[in-house]
Image: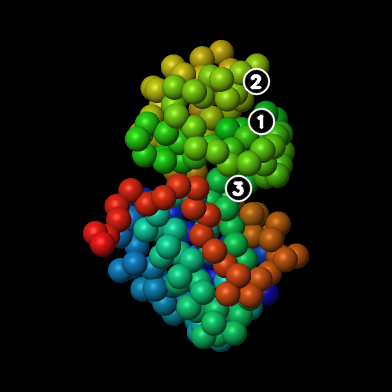
Amino acid sequence: MKGLLFDTSLPTSLTALTSNNQVILQCRRKGDNGHSATLLRDVENLLQEAGWDYNDLDFIAAGVGPGSFTGVRVSVSTAKGLAFTLKKPVIAVCTLDAIAAIMPVEMPVAVMIDAGRQRVYAANYPEGTIARKAEIRIIPLAELAHEFEGTHILAAGPALLKYRHEIETAMGPSLAGVMDGFDGLTARGFLQAVRQGMENPMDPSDLVPLYLQEPTVRKRR
């Protein structure tokens, strides 16, 4: 089984090729969410390096967010366009799940992505699993202590690149530690999340973005 994986919901995009459940090539590109201009070029460069063409692919897996409104739209629309054209199934991957997939298994993990305006998209993952303990929520930083009260939890995800001090202060004694220094999204973690969805591949018409809020910029009527 050969697959194309990509996620553009974060400032750094991820594109990868997999074969028989192994990552064989990948590309991470920091684009500050300007991924519409580079995603297909990265895909084609990886295919050329692997000696594949689009018809060699068995499936397409796309990150559906949450994250940047524009970035999520790029990922989903590109996946749908390719899947319709190539007549391939698609697999939807939650970006938070893909980050949780590479976290240590000995403690629960709170994965957080910047949601703007001093808020984060957050989900709580029990030890050793990417099955969320509850639904993804948008949480103001000031309310993190209430959200995770009474737990001993590891904080991870790209929100720490922007809000580490605020998160450490807000979570206080509930915080067991942090994993920072990178956004947490890797091809290995993404592939692990893909494996969870392989039992339920979908028609591209059913692929939808995981939007938890309205866009902050709207067209004037």
Residue occupying the point 66% across, 30% down: 108
Is residue 34 visible in the rendered structure shown here? yes
Is residue 181 visible in the rendered structure shown here? no
Tell me the distance, in whole angstroms, between the alpha carbons under discs 1 and 3: 13 Å
Marks 2/3 in contact by CB < 8 Å: the verdict is no
User: For this rendering, which residue is in front, 110 or 73?
Assistant: 73
Residue occupying the point 61% across, 18% down: 149
Q: In the drawing, what numbered circle is on residue 108? A: 1
Residue 8, given in percent of the width and then of the height, sits at 43, 58
- Residue 45, compared with residue 15, is above or below; it is below
Which quarter of the rendering shows the N terminus?
A: bottom right
Q: Quadrant of residue 152?
A: top right
Residue 95, given in percent of the width and then of the height, sits at 53, 51
Question: Considering the numbered disc 2 on the image, is that residue within a helix, a strand or a loop?
Answer: loop
Residue 193, given in percent of the width and then of the height, sits at 64, 54
Three-letter amino acid code at disc 3?
Answer: Asp
Q: Residues within 10 Å of mark 3 (few under 14, many from 20)?
A: many
Marks 1/3 in contact by CB < 8 Å: the verdict is no
Q: Quadrant of residue 92?
A: bottom right
Marks 1/2 in contact by CB < 8 Å: the verdict is yes
Q: In the drawing, what numbered circle is on residue 97? A: 3
User: For this rendering, which residue is in front, 14 or 124?
Assistant: 124
Three-letter amino acid code at disc 2?
Answer: Thr
Residue identifier under label 2: 151
Tell me the distance, in whole angstroms, between the alpha carbons under discs 2 and 3: 20 Å
Judged by depth in the image, the label closer to the viewer, 1 or 2, is: 2
Residue 67, given in percent of the width and then of the height, sits at 44, 49
Question: Considering the numbered disc 1 on the image, is that residue within a helix, a strand or a loop?
Answer: loop
- Residue 93, compared with residue 59, is above or below; it is above
Residue occupying the point 49% across, 53% down: 211
Which quarter of the rendering shows the C terminus?
A: bottom left
* For marks 1 and 3 on the same chain, the one whose residue lies earlier in the sequence: 3
